[in-house]
Amino acid sequence: MAEVQTASNGKPRFSRILLKLSGEALAPAQGAGLDLDALAEVALEIKEVAGLGVQLALVIGAGNYIRGTDYEARGMDRSTADQMGMLATVINSLALQHALEKRGLYTRVMSAIQMDQVAEPWIRRRAVRHLEKGRIVVMAAGTGNPYFTTDSAAALRAMEVKAEVILKATQVDGIYSADPKKDPKAKKFDSISYLEVLEKGLKVMDATAISLCMDNRLPIIVFDLGVRGNIMRAVMGEKIGSIVKE
Ligand code: UDP
């Protein structure tokens, strides 16, 4: 996997990336659903990056609708709750596809749960072909399995299509030693190892996703989606947010 460095020669640092968007970062100020204006903004940023010839695989979560564990805590069978969560990622993926197409981009949604009328089935070789042709591939329905998260799906799919990096766009500007909203002494890590993330129990991605990235030396850059231009900065190799690597 690529060693991440800063680059300032005007060329993108990466040629194929997996961008993971958290559902929650695209939620409206109140209640469930999607903030379509925020989504349109993200689509514009993605267009700018795609315009540089960067191949883009996208995974979007569903925290803006359903998290399996929340429903489990309220008495629902976990597998059923997780299946609902995965279906919610398809809703988000379709919205994302629409926002991208409105910007004139070519996209495909590929779903880990078969739903032929709505999306293509996930077929790795076909996904790679789409990427090579410059189509943005939105990878929906997580891994298709309960007890996983879309972070694990992002790690898995990144590996499958040989993305050079996972860009995890979220609501915080990096990885902290504690919740910066609750602990004023919380320290931000510019760079941190996979093992440290696991040992310290930092809430970057779940342990399954981190382990998968560690085993395959896939770097993860965590950054704030709320700052305009951050996706481009990350793609250009600017030092933003926090990076998890060896
Ligand atoms: N989910 C799942 N398997 C997967 C991916 C997702 O069961 O491979 C379910 C799980 O219930 C999860 C929900 O889908 O809580 C939404 O995904 P996630 O919590 O990762 O969304 P995010 O936090 O990124 O918005």
Image (cartoon, helix red, strand yellow):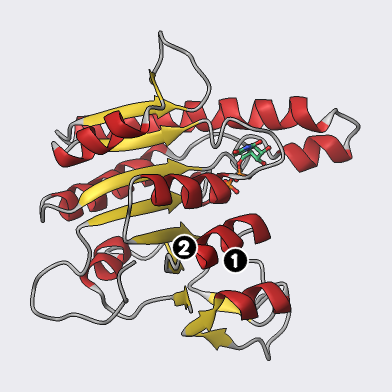
Report the amino acid beneath label 2: Asn
x and y percent of residue 120 in the render?
36, 19
Identify the residue at image location x=37%, y=27%.
Answer: 123
- Given the current orientation, which residue lies at the most extreme right position? 75
Q: Looking at the picture, does residue 152 appear above or below residue 142?
A: below
Mark 1 element type: loop
Marks 1 and 2, the one that precedes in the sequence = 1
Indicate which label's residue lies in the foreground, 1 or 2.
2
148 versus 237 height, above or below:
above
Position of residue 144 measured from the top left corner of the image (x, y, whole percent): 58, 30
In the visual, does 30 lie left or right of 245?
right
Picture layout, residue 55 above or below residue 89: below
Identify the residue position indicated by label 2 in the image. Answer: 216
Q: Tag 2, which secondary structure?
A: loop
**Whole-percent x and y of residue 149?**
62, 45
Q: Quadrant of ligand 1?
A: top right
To which quarter of the image does residue 166 belong? bottom left
What residue do we see at 58% from left, 56% from top? Answer: 209
- Residue extending farthest to the top is 117
Of residues 211 and 117, the one drawn nearer to the viewer in this rendering: 211
Three-letter code, disc 1:
Val
Instruction: Pick the quarter of the image with the N terminus.
Output: bottom left
Query: Dot 1: within a 10 Å radius of its alpha carbon, few (fewer than 14), some, or many (20 or more) residues?
Result: many
**Residue under circle 1?**
204
Q: Does the residue labelled 2 lie within 8 Å of ligand 1?
A: no
Q: How crowded is mark 2: few (under 14 residues within 10 Å), some or many (20 or more)?
A: few
